Image (cartoon, grey):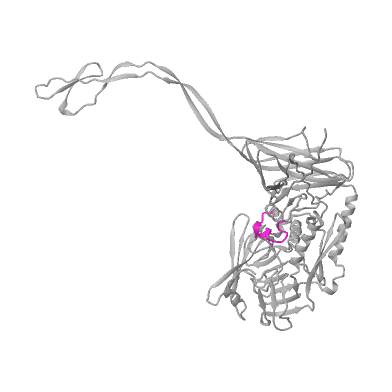
């Protein structure tokens, strides 16, 4: 349930209420149009959403919410392509104020113009994930997969990395099995949601949120809150899950004790194919533990409405034919603007637990199709996308790793594209500026002043030279005159040589070196190298792989190192593929770690001693997602031997 005040919860359950709706339309060019209740055609607005199908509880679903509304508006419909529509619900509280809650953010898909009205149909951001996905060799945690999808489709995440890691299976390393039916990022979210035991939806702020089913009711719906209601005569609960293992082509069954409930078929989940059997069992049991809280009575009811309710909320019905001791979960709902609020909770009948559903039949057909394609010898493509960002320095960093196994002795080709952010170190430059400075000749002047004796009138006369060489007299009493310089000579023209040191810092260049490795052997004949200044750059990588052995697992790795700076590769900026004929799925790591330790020779003297050994052991898995493991060993270890005389 969307967090609201206690006053809101009290007002929304009253027999009468006062409320109104508002909205905002924002076009792709930034134009904004506000509309209120008077602009909405009565009975035309609705918001519908769901997290399950029409028959049973599902995990990993990625349904999009739909919004439809008709407005009395003259907005040009051609400007509303991909426009954003926001709706708000305002409820009057007992103190007379209004509380506003958002009802979602939607993107317009259709805009139809009538004479006086404008019909809009829009969907939330879930449709953005309908983009082609090609990272079939991606490795990472569930957070890495979700982050990769959100970044590629430009949708914000509602939960942080810590939130995902706190969930069961949240810290497990997952990899996509090559033979799968993944086509879009939405498919990836579906399988990630299954692993986490929940479902994905777009919340009211337009962010991707993972929700799980619970067993704590958020509110009670009494008879006075319902127009109509119907309840099933059975309880939906699950005590087992089934997952198809592609490697063994068998269905693995995991259950609780007692196993007397329904079984949820996870189908062929590409994220649940790798690892030991114990690892897959732990993953599936964590999913089952999340699913075991489902103990719901399916229902269908029309209510007076509470816009704060969300998908997955658990509610309790009271009065009438409802069982007050049971709970139900909202799996679909439709909120009409100014009308009724329809709620629905689906569930499968335990009496039909042994019947094969349509979903089970589709899974069987998919399995057969994958097997047929595997044997057909068609051209196969193994793709890779990095699920985590990494920084490359002077040491080699593995940026691409693809496993593949051809069914025949064929040739394959490696293609790669890497977008990097280069950060070159600054370098200091210095030069000496040299040049000649010309000093021209100039006239040297001197101020000359002559004082004459007083005339008969008692005034002084100043004698100055006139322009025609004569002498002019001027009485000092008539005012001071300006002093005129006298040229006494000229300077000599000179040329001087000048040297000036100049020092500055500028952006340097980072040299990025790529190394190919095939089956643990470094390929020496072809090692691409690029020199870049700071900024975003891209490089295309290619290498033909010849003389492949049939039915043999191969590993192709790409390493990178940088000198003169560092290079960063963001999530999803590293794309690679290996293409060839008769490509099968690469064998998964079986979970076995081989460790060899070599110690120096131990000299055994005449006396055997017991000594304490303290050792710090650090494990490092050099993968694209780097993780380390450390342990400390304490204890006393005994070294013993028996000595016998030896004759030479």
Whether residue 185 is visible here, answered yes or no, is yes
Depth check: give the residue in front, 368 or 395: 395
Which region shows up in magenta?
153-171
Does the magenta portion include 303?
no
Does the magenta portion include 156?
yes
Q: Quadrant of residue 415?
A: top right
Q: Quadrant of residue 119?
A: bottom right
Tell me the quadrant of the picture where the N terminus can be found.
Answer: bottom right
Whether residue 59 is visible here, answered yes or no, is no
Q: Residue at x 15, y 20 (%)?
A: 452
Does residue 160 appear left or right of residue 501 in this picture? right
Give the residue at the far bottom of this rendering. 320
Q: Residue at x 74, y 37 (%)?
A: 515
Number of numbered discs overlaid on the protein picture: 0
Depth check: give the residue in front, 323 or 500: 323
Q: Where does the image place residue 63, in percent across and percent down from the top left?
A: 73, 63
Task: Give the answer, above or below, for where 177 lies relative to 579.
Answer: below
Q: Where does the image place residue 648, in percent across and percent down from the top left?
A: 82, 32
Does residue 485 appear left or right of residue 20 in this picture? left
Depth check: give the residue in front, 363 or 496: 363
Q: Quadrant of residue 17?
A: bottom right
Does residue 479 appear left or right of residue 406 in this picture? left
Q: Where does the image place residue 52, in percent across and percent down from the top left?
A: 76, 67
Does residue 481 appear left or right of residue 619 in this picture? left
Task: Give the answer, above or below, for where 476 lies relative to 289.
Answer: above
Depth check: give the residue in front, 130 or 426: 426
Q: Where does the image place residue 509, in percent across and percent down from the top left?
A: 62, 35
Main SS of residues in magenta: loop
């Amino acid at each position: 349930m969307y967090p609201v005040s206690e006053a809101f919860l009290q007002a929304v359950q009253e027999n009468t209420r006062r409320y109104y709706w508002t909205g905002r339309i924002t076009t792709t060019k930034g134009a904004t149009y506000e509309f209120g209740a008077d602009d909405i055609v009565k009975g035309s607005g609705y918001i519908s959403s769901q997290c399950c199908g029409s028959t049973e509880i599902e995990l990993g679903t990625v349904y999009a919410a739909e919004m439809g509304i008709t407005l009395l508006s003259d907005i040009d419909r051609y400007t509303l392509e991909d426009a954003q529509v926001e709706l708000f619900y305002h409820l009057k509280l007992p103190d007379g104020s209004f509380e506003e809650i958002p009802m979602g953010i939607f993107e317009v898909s259709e805009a139809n113009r009538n004479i006086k009205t404008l019909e809009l149909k829009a969907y939330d951001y879930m449709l953005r994930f309908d983009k082609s996905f090609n990272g079939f060799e991606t490795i990472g945690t569930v957070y890495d997969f979700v982050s990769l999808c959100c970044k590629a489709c430009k949708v914000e995440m509602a939960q942080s990395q810590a939130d995902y890691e706190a969930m069961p299976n949240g810290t497990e390393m997952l990899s996509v099995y090559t033979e799968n039916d993944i086509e879009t990022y939405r498919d990836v979210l579906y399988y990630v949601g299954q692993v986490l035991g929940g479902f994905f939806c777009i919340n009211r702020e337009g962010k991707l949120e993972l929700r799980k089913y619970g067993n704590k009711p958020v509110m009670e719906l009494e008879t006075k809150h319902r127009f109509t209601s119907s309840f099933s005569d059975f309880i939906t609960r699950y005590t087992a899950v089934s997952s198809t293992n592609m490697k063994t082509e068998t269905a693995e069954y995991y259950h609780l004790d007692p196993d007397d409930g329904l079984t949820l078929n996870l189908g062929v989940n590409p994220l649940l194919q790798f690892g030991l059997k114990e690892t897959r069992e732990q993953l599936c049991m964590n999913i089952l533990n999340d699913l075991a809280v489902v103990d719901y009575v399916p229902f269908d009811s029309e209510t007076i409405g509470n816009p704060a309710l969300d998908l997955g909320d658990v509610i309790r019905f009271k009065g009438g034919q409802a069982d007050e001791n049971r709970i139900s979960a909202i799996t679909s709902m439709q909120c009409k603007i100014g009308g009724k609020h329809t709620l629905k909770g689906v569930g499968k009948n335990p009496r039909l637990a042994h019947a094969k559903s349509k979903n089970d039949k589709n899974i069987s057909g998919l399995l057969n199709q994958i097997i047929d394609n595997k044997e057909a010898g068609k051209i196969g493509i193994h793709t890779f996308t990095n699920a985590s960002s990494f920084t490359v320095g002077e040491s080699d960093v593995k940026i691409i790793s693809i496993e593949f196994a051809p069914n025949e002795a064929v040739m394959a080709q490696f293609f790669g594209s890497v977008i990097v952010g280069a950060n070159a170190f600054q370098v200091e430059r210095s030069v000496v500026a040299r040049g000649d400075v010309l000093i021209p000749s100039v006239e040297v002047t001197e101020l000359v002043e002559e004082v004459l004796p007083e005339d008969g009138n008692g005034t002084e006369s100043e004698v100055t030279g006139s322009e025609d060489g004569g002498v002019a007299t001027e009485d000092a009493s008539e005012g001071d005159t300006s002093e005129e310089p006298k040229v006494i000579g000229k300077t000599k023209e000179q040329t001087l040589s000048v040297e000036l040191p100049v020092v500055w810092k500028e952006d340097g260049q980072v040299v990025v070196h790529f190394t190919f490795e095939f089956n643990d052997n470094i390929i020496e004949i072809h090692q691409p190298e690029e020199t870049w200044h700071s900024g975003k750059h891209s490089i295309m990588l290619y290498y033909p792989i010849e003389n492949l052995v049939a039915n043999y697992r191969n590993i192709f790795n790409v390493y990178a190192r940088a000198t003169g700076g560092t290079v960063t590769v963001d999530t999803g900026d590293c794309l690679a593929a290996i293409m060839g004929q008769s490509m099968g799925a690469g064998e998964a790591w079986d979970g076995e770690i081989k460790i060899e330790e070599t110690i120096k020779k131990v000299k055994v003297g005449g006396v055997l001693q017991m000594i304490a050994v303290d050792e710090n052991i650090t494990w490092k898995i050099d993968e694209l997602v780097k993780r380390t493991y450390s342990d400390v060993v304490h204890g006393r270890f005994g070294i013993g031997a028996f000595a016998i005389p030896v004759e030479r």
